[in-house]
Amino acid sequence: MYAVIRAGGKQYRVAPGDVIRVEKLGGDQKQVEFGDVLAVSGNAGEIGKPQGEARVVGQVVDQVKGDKVLVFHYKRKKQYKKLNGHRQQYTAVRITEIAFDGQSFKAPEKK
């Protein structure tokens, strides 16, 4: 059982219990609900766009920073060099439930 969701302009394939890194979510939320569900897998390997209301619920685990990315600009023969760095901020989210068409698939409780 898995779903494909859209968050922060990117698409993620998630299953109950997965931990994903999405772009930083504002506020001090403990739970996040992703309403933009693009596809859901059903029984016997079927996959398709959900007909009715579909939602994916997750629990915020941590706010983290990604690795540093160096941006280097250079023009030859002109003595021009410029170095910049960037660290993207992410929110780690653990998927707790996928619900659609009256069915609900929950992740096992984590101690």
Image (cartoon, rainbow, N blue to C red):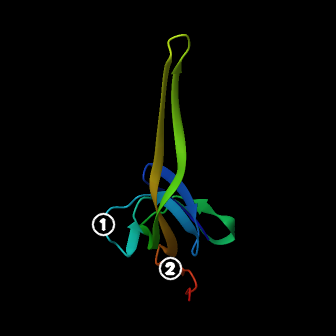
Does the rendering let one see residue 53? Answer: no
Which residue is the site of mark 2? 104
Does the rendering let one see residue 103? Answer: yes
Point out the image quarter for the N terminus.
bottom right
> Label 1: few (<14), some or many (≥20) within 10 Å?
few
Residue 91 image position (x, y, % from top left): 45, 63
Q: Residue drawn at (43%, 69%), measured in percent from left and top?
A: 55
Task: Establish if 92 lies above or below 89.
Answer: below
Q: Residue drawn at (39%, 75%), measured in percent from left and top?
A: 31
Q: Residue drawn at (56%, 14%), measured in percent from left and top?
A: 76
| Marks 1/2: CA–CA distance | 27 Å
Q: Residue drawn at (56%, 85%), measured in percent from left and top?
A: 110
Disc 1 element: loop
The residue type indicated by label 1 comes to: Gly
The residue type indicated by label 2 comes to: Ser
Q: Residue reaching furthest right?
A: 44
| Closer to the camera in the image, 22 or 77 | 77
Nearest to N terminus: mark 1 or mark 2:
1
Numbered tag placed on residue 27 in the rendering? 1
| Residue 32 shown left or right of residue 94 in the figure | left
Residue 52 image position (x, y, % from top left): 42, 66
Residue 80 image position (x, y, % from top left): 48, 19
> Label 2: few (<14), some or many (≥20) within 10 Å?
few
Q: Residue reaching furthest top?
A: 77
Task: Establish if 70 lies above or below 88.
Answer: above
Point out the frontmost of discs 1 and 2.
Answer: 1
| Closer to the camera in the image, 14 or 29 | 29
